[in-house]
Amino acid sequence: MTSAVPMVGMLPAALATGVGSDVQRGLGTVIVGGLFAATGLILFVIPTLHFVIERFMEKRMSGGAKEALQV
Protein backbone atom coordinates (compact mmCIF):
# COMPACT_ATOMS: atom_id res chain seq x y z
CA MET A 1 0.00 0.00 0.00
CA THR A 2 2.81 2.38 0.84
CA SER A 3 4.26 2.14 -2.66
CA ALA A 4 1.03 1.61 -4.57
CA VAL A 5 -0.61 4.91 -3.57
CA PRO A 6 2.27 7.16 -4.75
CA MET A 7 2.58 5.14 -7.98
CA VAL A 8 -1.10 5.59 -8.77
CA GLY A 9 -0.90 9.25 -7.75
CA MET A 10 2.01 9.94 -10.08
CA LEU A 11 0.55 8.11 -13.09
CA PRO A 12 -1.26 11.24 -14.38
CA ALA A 13 2.04 13.13 -14.25
CA ALA A 14 3.82 10.30 -16.07
CA LEU A 15 1.16 10.19 -18.79
CA ALA A 16 0.64 13.96 -19.16
CA THR A 17 0.59 15.48 -22.64
CA GLY A 18 -0.48 19.08 -22.01
CA VAL A 19 1.41 22.32 -21.40
CA GLY A 20 4.47 21.80 -19.19
CA SER A 21 4.33 18.06 -19.62
CA ASP A 22 7.95 17.81 -20.80
CA VAL A 23 9.22 18.25 -17.22
CA GLN A 24 6.23 16.68 -15.51
CA ARG A 25 6.33 13.51 -17.62
CA GLY A 26 10.01 12.92 -16.96
CA LEU A 27 9.66 13.37 -13.22
CA GLY A 28 6.55 11.17 -13.05
CA THR A 29 8.19 8.41 -15.06
CA VAL A 30 11.26 8.36 -12.82
CA ILE A 31 9.20 8.30 -9.62
CA VAL A 32 6.79 5.58 -10.81
CA GLY A 33 9.63 3.46 -12.22
CA GLY A 34 11.72 3.85 -9.09
CA LEU A 35 8.85 2.91 -6.80
CA PHE A 36 8.01 -0.10 -8.97
CA ALA A 37 11.64 -1.28 -8.98
CA ALA A 38 12.08 -0.69 -5.24
CA THR A 39 8.91 -2.60 -4.43
CA GLY A 40 10.03 -5.57 -6.50
CA LEU A 41 13.46 -5.45 -4.93
CA ILE A 42 12.10 -5.34 -1.39
CA LEU A 43 9.45 -8.03 -1.89
CA PHE A 44 11.34 -10.55 -4.03
CA VAL A 45 15.08 -9.97 -4.49
CA ILE A 46 16.19 -9.15 -0.93
CA PRO A 47 14.34 -12.06 0.77
CA THR A 48 15.66 -14.49 -1.87
CA LEU A 49 19.20 -13.18 -1.45
CA HIS A 50 18.90 -13.47 2.33
CA PHE A 51 17.69 -17.07 2.02
CA VAL A 52 20.56 -18.01 -0.31
CA ILE A 53 23.22 -16.40 1.89
CA GLU A 54 21.76 -18.00 5.02
CA ARG A 55 21.78 -21.42 3.34
CA PHE A 56 25.38 -20.89 2.20
CA MET A 57 26.52 -19.90 5.68
CA GLU A 58 24.80 -22.93 7.24
CA LYS A 59 26.62 -25.27 4.85
CA ARG A 60 29.92 -23.50 5.38
CA MET A 61 29.75 -23.56 9.15
CA SER A 62 29.26 -27.13 10.19
CA GLY A 63 29.59 -28.76 13.58
CA GLY A 64 31.54 -26.92 16.31
CA ALA A 65 31.99 -23.62 14.49
CA LYS A 66 28.22 -23.22 14.16
CA GLU A 67 27.61 -23.97 17.85
CA ALA A 68 30.36 -21.55 18.95
CA LEU A 69 28.67 -18.59 17.20
CA GLN A 70 25.18 -19.21 18.59
CA VAL A 71 24.33 -17.18 21.68
Image (spheres, rainbow, N blue to C red):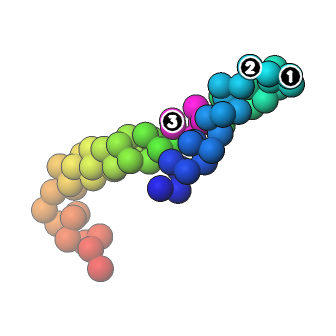
Instruction: Bin the neighbour count of mark 3 within 10 Å (Cα to Cα): few under 14, some 14-19, many 20 and up.
Output: few
Kind of element beneath mark 2: loop
Per the image, the residue denoted by label 2 is 17
Mark 1 residue type: Val
Snapshot quadrant of residue 66: bottom left
> Is residue 53 visible in this depiction of the protein?
no
Q: Find residue 39 and report its horizontal and vertical position in percent.
A: 47, 44
Cβ–Cβ below 8 Å for labels 2 and 3?
Answer: no
Kind of element beneath mark 1: loop
User: Going by the picture, which residue comes out furthest to the right?
Assistant: 20
Kind of element beneath mark 3: helix
User: Going by the picture, which residue comes out furthest to the left?
Assistant: 63
Q: Is residue 55 left or right of residue 8?
A: left
Give the mark nearer the N terminus: 3 vs 1: 1
Q: Give the range drawn in magenta.
A: 32-37
Q: Find residue 28 and report its horizontal and vertical position in percent.
A: 69, 33
> Is residue 22 visible in this depiction of the protein?
yes
**In-front residue for pair 20/46:** 20
In reply to whether residue 22 is colored magenta, the answer given is no
Mark 2 residue type: Thr
Give the main secondary structure of the magenta stretch.
Answer: helix
Q: Find residue 21 and report its horizontal and vertical position in percent.
A: 80, 23
Q: Is residue 49 left or right of residue 64?
A: right
Per the image, the residue denoted by label 1 is 19
**Residue located 38% across and 40% down the image:** 45
Q: Find residue 56 and report its horizontal and vertical position in percent.
A: 24, 46
Mark 3 residue type: Ala
Cβ–Cβ below 8 Å for labels 3 and 1?
Answer: no
